[in-house]
């Protein structure tokens, strides 16, 4: 990212969309990889993740067993831009799939700093001298992402102020999924109501300033997790699912999963025994963080 792009990023809180793969290349790769990913025998969370069923925790960290995703998180189109924001020493600490099927609700407006929003336990902690940091998320469209299929939405410039208190606890209720309409739009948060975390219970995000991130397959958007973001519902006008893959990056000085050996959220629980953050750029001098140097099948990660 050049100087003007960085200035714009710091003002708006996001950059892109930008191309990571050609459209036909992305479609062909996903046709192949979606079948391989059905096999969870080498997944870091294995049967635990499968037991989580349709909850979002089942979609975590498949880069730890998939060669394609392991290479994806280190692609220069992504890492070069991430390091221009975070500096030379960078970890990928989590990845997630975000599928949206015809008829699925949109996602609540939300921000994430420590990612304690569902469990109440901070999952990333920046040094004390830094007020809050969040993560740089790179959300890649594996399929068409538009206003019919449920694309991302951002409210530019909201990344410098937290409107939510992540030390509060949200209450998980799977019956909430696809059941709530908020201000005329069907939105939820994977069985939670994100409004429970609002610092001011009467506050509402200014949706008049929202912008929709329409992306073709193979395009990506880079944004701060503290940026107010949401997604639209999939209105069912097409029978194609919308699939995004989010890779999350932090500087190596950030502590990942401090004081915990499991993730508990979205109605599921997985052990971190096979977990390791991936060094995608530079060097790691933080002894707190456990580093994975290869996938569970032995495919090496690339450090740039």
Image: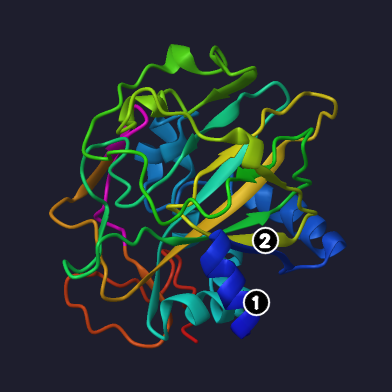
**Can you give x and y, in whole percent of width and height, for residue 301 in the image?**
47, 77
Q: Which of marks 1 and 2 is nearer the N terminus?
A: 1
Residue that extends furthest to the left in the rendered view of this protein: 259
Compared with residue 116, is residue 293 higher up or lower down, i.e. above or below? Answer: below
The residue drawn where x is 78% and y is 42% is 146
Compared with residue 266, is residue 218 higher up or lower down, i.e. above or below? Answer: below
CA distance for labels 1 and 2: 10 Å
Residues shaded magenta: 264-275
Residue 18 or residue 273, whichever sits in front: 18
Q: Is mark 2 on a helix, strand or loop?
A: strand
Q: Can residue 1 be seen in this view?
A: no
**Can you give x and y, in whole percent of width and height, for residue 282 in the image?**
40, 88
Looking at the image, residue 251 sits to the left or right of residue 304; the answer is left
Residue 111 magenta: no
Q: Do the residues labelled 1 and 2 touch (CB within 8 Å)?
A: yes
Q: How crowded is mark 1: few (under 14 residues within 10 Å), some or many (20 or more)?
A: some
The residue drawn where x is 34% and y is 87% is 283
The residue where tag 1 is placed is 77
The residue where tag 2 is placed is 220
């Amino acid at each position: 990212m050049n100087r003007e792009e960085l200035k714009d990023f710091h003002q708006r809180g996001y950059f892109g969309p930008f191309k990571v793969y050609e459209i036909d290349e992305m479609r062909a790769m996903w046709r192949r990889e979606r079948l391989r990913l059905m096999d969870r025998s080498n997944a870091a969370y294995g049967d635990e993740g499968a037991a989580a069923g349709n909850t979002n925790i089942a979609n975590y960290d498949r880069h730890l067993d998939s060669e394609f995703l392991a290479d994806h998180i280190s692609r220069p189109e992504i890492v070069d831009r991430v390091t221009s924001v975070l500096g030379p020493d960078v970890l990928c600490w989590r990845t997630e799939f975000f599928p949206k099927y015809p008829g699925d609700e949109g996602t609540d407006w939300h921000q994430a700093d420590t990612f304690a929003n569902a469990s109440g336990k901070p999952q990333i902690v920046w040094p004390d001298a830094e007020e809050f940091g969040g993560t740089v998320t790179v959300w890649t469209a594996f399929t068409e992402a538009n206003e019919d299929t449920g694309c991302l939405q951002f409210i530019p410039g909201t990344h410098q102020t937290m409107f939510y208190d992540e030390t509060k606890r949200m209450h998980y209720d799977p019956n909430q999924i696809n059941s709530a309409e908020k201000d005329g739009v069907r939105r939820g948060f994977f069985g939670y109501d994100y409004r429970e975390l609002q610092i001011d219970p009467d506050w509402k995000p200014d949706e008049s300033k929202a912008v929709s991130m329409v992306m073709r397959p193979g395009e990506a958007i880079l944004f701060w997790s503290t940026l107010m973001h949401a997604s639209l519902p999939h209105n069912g006008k097409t029978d194609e699912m919308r699939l995004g893959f989010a890779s999350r990056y932090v500087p190596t000085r950030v502590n990942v999963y401090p004081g915990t050996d499991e993730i508990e959220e979205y109605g599921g629980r997985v052990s971190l025994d096979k977990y390791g953050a991936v060094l995608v750029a530079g060097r790691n001098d933080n002894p707190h963080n456990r580093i994975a140097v290869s996938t569970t099948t032995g495919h090496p990660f690339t450090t740039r």
